[in-house]
Image (cartoon, rainbow, N blue to C red):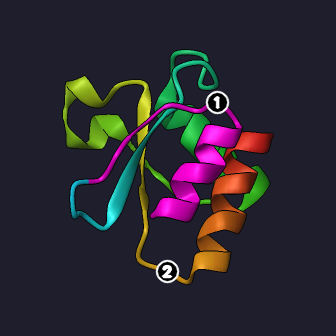
Amino acid sequence: RDAAIALLDSHDTGYLRPQGAFYLWIDVRGRSGGDVNAWALDVLRRRGVAVAPGTTFGPTGEGWVRASLATATDELLDGIGRLVEG
């Protein structure tokens, strides 16, 4: 979690700090062009990174994606790097 947050910080990407959960909410409002569902599908196709669009969890999730932290640190950092760098 801490390494993922540090990577997001280094890319000036907003997030909600997890409070004991195994997932991380990432702010993609500036990247998604207003359609997080389409953006998440594009990220999956082009970059091989799967995230859940925030709207899956309700309308207040628009502009956000949820990423699982339940993986090896190197895989997590690789995925978040591909998510924020492209």
Q: What residue type is labelled 1?
A: Asp
Query: Up-down: is 3 above or below 73?
Result: above
Q: Is residue 75 magenta?
A: no
Image spot of residue 22 (x, y percent): 31, 68
State which quadrant residue 65 falls in. top left
Query: Up-down: is 18 above or below 11?
Result: below
For disc 2, the marked residue is 71
Which quadrant would the N terminus be assigned to in this image?
A: bottom left
| Rendered residue at 28%/43% (across/down) | 56
Image spot of residue 81 (x, y percent): 72, 54
Query: Up-down: is 12 above or below 72?
Result: above
Residue sitting at the far bottom:
72
| Rendered residue at 63%/55% (across/down) | 80
Magenta residues (range): 1-18
For disc 1, the marked residue is 12
| Rendered residue at 69%/41% (across/down) | 10
- Pick whichever, 82 or 49, lies toward us: 82
Which quadrant would the C terminus be assigned to in this image?
A: top right
